[in-house]
């Protein structure tokens, strides 16, 4: 029983961390637009969107990698997956304890 929970937690945490790059980010200056940091809980993608001269504050999100340079910090990406996976496993255990107590 323990193995499927771990596999589900790893897959779910990977999906959630990758989906976090689609969340909008608030940018307040041209300097911040040159380094838009994306990803949660810690930013692991840095994208240069300085090409666009918007009005500030500006809400932006991950855009095309063909138009804007990106840096991917894989070590931070894997740390994010581990953090989210630990939280998911902890939630599974809490729900299991609650389900046992409600019987």
Image (spheres, rainbow, N blue to C red):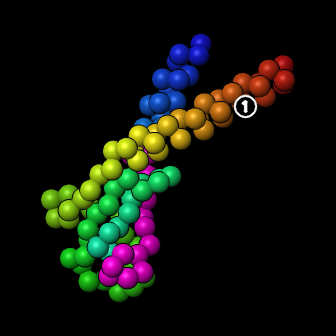
Q: Which residues are magenta?
A: 17-32
User: Which residue occupies 33% across, 50% down?
Assistant: 73
User: Which residue occupies 59% across, 13% down?
Assistant: 1
**Residue 33 occupies which quadrant of the picture?**
bottom left
Q: Is residue 46 magenta?
A: no
Q: Horizontal and vertical percent for residue 50?
A: 25, 76
**Disc 1: CA contacts within 10 A as few (<14), some (14-19) or many (>=20):** few
Residue at image mark 1? 94
Q: Is residue 3 above or below residue 92?
A: above
Q: Quadrant of the C terminus?
A: top right
Q: Horizontal and vertical percent for residue 76?
A: 41, 47
Q: Is residue 22 magenta?
A: yes
The residue lying toward the viewer, choosing from 43 and 60, is: 43
Residue found at the very far front of the displayed protein: 75
**Residue 100 occupies which quadrant of the picture?**
top right
Decide if residue 15 is in sight here: no
Q: Is residue 100 left or right of residue 23?
A: right
Q: Horizontal and vertical percent for residue 38?
A: 39, 59
User: Which residue occupies 65% across, 29% down?
Assistant: 92
Q: Is residue 26 left or right of residue 101?
A: left
Residue found at the very far left of the displayed protein: 66
């Amino acid at each position: 029983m323990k193995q499927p929970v771990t596999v589900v937690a790893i897959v779910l945490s990977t999906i959630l961390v990758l989906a976090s790059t689609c969340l909008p980010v608030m940018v307040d200056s041209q300097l911040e637009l040159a380094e838009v940091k994306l990803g949660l809980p810690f930013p692991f993608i840095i994208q240069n969107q300085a090409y666009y001269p918007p009005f500030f504050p500006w809400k932006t999100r991950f855009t095309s990698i063909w138009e804007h340079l990106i840096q991917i910090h894989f070590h931070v990406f894997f740390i994010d997956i581990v953090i989210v996976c630990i939280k998911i496993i902890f939630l599974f255990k809490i729900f299991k304890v609650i389900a046992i107590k409600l019987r």
